[in-house]
Image (cartoon, rainbow, N blue to C red):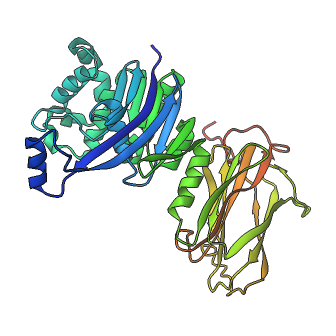
């Protein structure tokens, strides 16, 4: 069966009473005027995830992400709206959710498997695979109360994904634990996607959202603020995190259809950016390993005592490939005055694999744009890398190993 999710006008409100007396009076006089105030944590949420698609949900803490997943999975009741799901659903919401601390991991695994629709016989057949994937050793036969949060996550994920579900829902739980198991878990998720599983994932991990998802939704204040490609939404989200009272965030659509995010207070802005080839000429296509120069012209609109320029190269999925700035390169910029125009150049070997790349620029103080964000500009430049003079290789980086053979 193909899995799908349809959410229509979903909302969740809680009752807030001024005191215990008001709560009691409302309970005793149900037909009298309400004595509570409704506090909405989610409102007017509508979206659809078609079979085989992957949707990412992001937002700051308190935006309503976890509440939304609880409403979708039925662990909390909605105040308004409906949720329709087709197919067998597996959900990873909270660490060890449903685990009894006094039962062993094996006993909890058998019970949890039956809660997601697997028979006792199926679970017994799947236990060797669950045990191998969780990799918690002898702890499997010890009470769950002695488990670390990472061990609970390992066992919970192994049980939830012991058999490929039609719909997989994953909360931030996978951010807990060691990097090895995170990689292992996402490899299984990617494998399920290739086999047709519909995925709904909540994560602050930019790499996870952009590498796994087709679309993303930004929740803000309990409502859907934006919906679009993962790169577009993550760029907007990062700009929103740096937003201050004297800043603004805007998005512009390029002729290519890509959406560019620009934010900042405007004390300094990028006027022009170009990637120069070895002849010092701006070019859109460059050879693997060629010597290039990134030239950035900056206009200063207000006196700034401490200016930093940074850049980040991203691949076609928006994953960061490399980034640095003048602060970390120990190339300080003297105090600048209103009206000045500055030209920065960064020269390097373009040791990237063939493909399409973009450059984001950041003008700020100190070492990060989260302090004073004068301007953050995604998709400031787009360029292509082609393999014109090297042997065949795969990947995003040209490493060019020297091969030696010994023993013959």
Q: Quadrant of residue 227?
A: top right
Q: Position of residue 108 (x, y in %)?
A: 18, 29
Q: Is residue 109 left or right of residue 276?
A: left
Q: Quadrant of the N terminus?
A: top left
Q: Residue at x 10, y 42 (%)?
A: 29
In the image, residue 116 above or below residue 239: above
Q: Is residue 71 left or right of residue 368?
A: left
Q: Residue at x 53, y 65 (%)?
A: 242
Q: Residue at x 24, y 38 (%)?
A: 96
In the image, residue 22 above or below residue 330: above
Q: Residue at x 49, y 33 (%)?
A: 47
Q: Residue furthest front?
A: 32
Q: Front-most of 373 and 40?
A: 40
Q: Is residue 185 left or right of residue 285?
A: left
Q: Position of residue 250 (x, y in %)?
A: 64, 58
Q: Quadrant of residue 347?
A: bottom right
């Amino acid at each position: 069966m193909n899995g799908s999710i349809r959410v229509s006008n979903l909302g969740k409100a809680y009752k807030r009473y001024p005191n215990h007396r008001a709560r009691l009076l409302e309970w005793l006089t149900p037909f009298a005027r309400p004595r509570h105030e409704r506090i909405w944590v989610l409102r007017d949420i509508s979206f659809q995830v078609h079979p085989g698609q992957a949707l990412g949900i992001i937002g700051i803490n308190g935006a309503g992400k976890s509440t939304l997943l609880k409403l979708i999975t039925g662990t909390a009741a909605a105040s308004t709206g409906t949720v329709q799901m087709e197919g067998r659903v597996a959900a990873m919401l909270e660490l060890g959710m449903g685990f009894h601390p006094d039962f062993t991991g094996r006993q909890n695994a058998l019970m949890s498997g039956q809660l997601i629709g697997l028979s006792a016989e199926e679970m017994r057949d799947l236990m060797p695979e669950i045990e191998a994937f969780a990799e918690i050793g002898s702890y499997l036969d010890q009470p769950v109360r002695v488990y670390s949060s990472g061990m609970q996550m390992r066992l919970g994920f192994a049980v939830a994904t012991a058999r490929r579900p039609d719909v997989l829902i994953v909360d931030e739980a996978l951010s807990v634990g060691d990097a090895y198991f995170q990689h292992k878990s996402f490899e299984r998720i990617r494998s399920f996607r290739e086999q047709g599983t519909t995925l709904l994932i909540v994560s602050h991990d930019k790499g996870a959202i952009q590498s796994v998802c087709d679309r993303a939704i930004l929740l803000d204040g309990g409502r859907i603020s934006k919906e679009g490609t993962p790169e577009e939404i993550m760029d907007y989200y990062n700009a929103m995190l740096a937003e201050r009272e004297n800043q603004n965030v805007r998005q512009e659509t390029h002729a290519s259809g890509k959406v560019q995010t620009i934010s900042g207070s405007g004390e300094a802005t990028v006027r022009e950016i170009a990637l120069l080839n070895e002849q010092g000429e701006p070019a859109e296509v460059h050879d693997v390993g060629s010597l290039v120069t990134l030239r950035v012209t900056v206009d200063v609109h207000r006196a700034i005592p401490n200016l930093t320029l940074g850049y980040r190269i991203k691949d076609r999925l928006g994953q960061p490939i490399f980034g640095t700035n003048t602060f970390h390169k120990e190339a300080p910029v003297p105090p600048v005055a209103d009206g000045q125009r500055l030209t920065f150049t960064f020269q390097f070997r373009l040791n990237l694999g063939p493909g399409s790349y973009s450059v984001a620029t950041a003008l700020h103080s100190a070492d990060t744009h989260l302090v004073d964000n004068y301007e953050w500009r995604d998709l400031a430049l787009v360029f292509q890398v082609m393999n014109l003079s090297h042997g065949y290789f795969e990947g995003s980086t040209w490493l060019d190993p020297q091969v030696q053979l010994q023993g013959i």
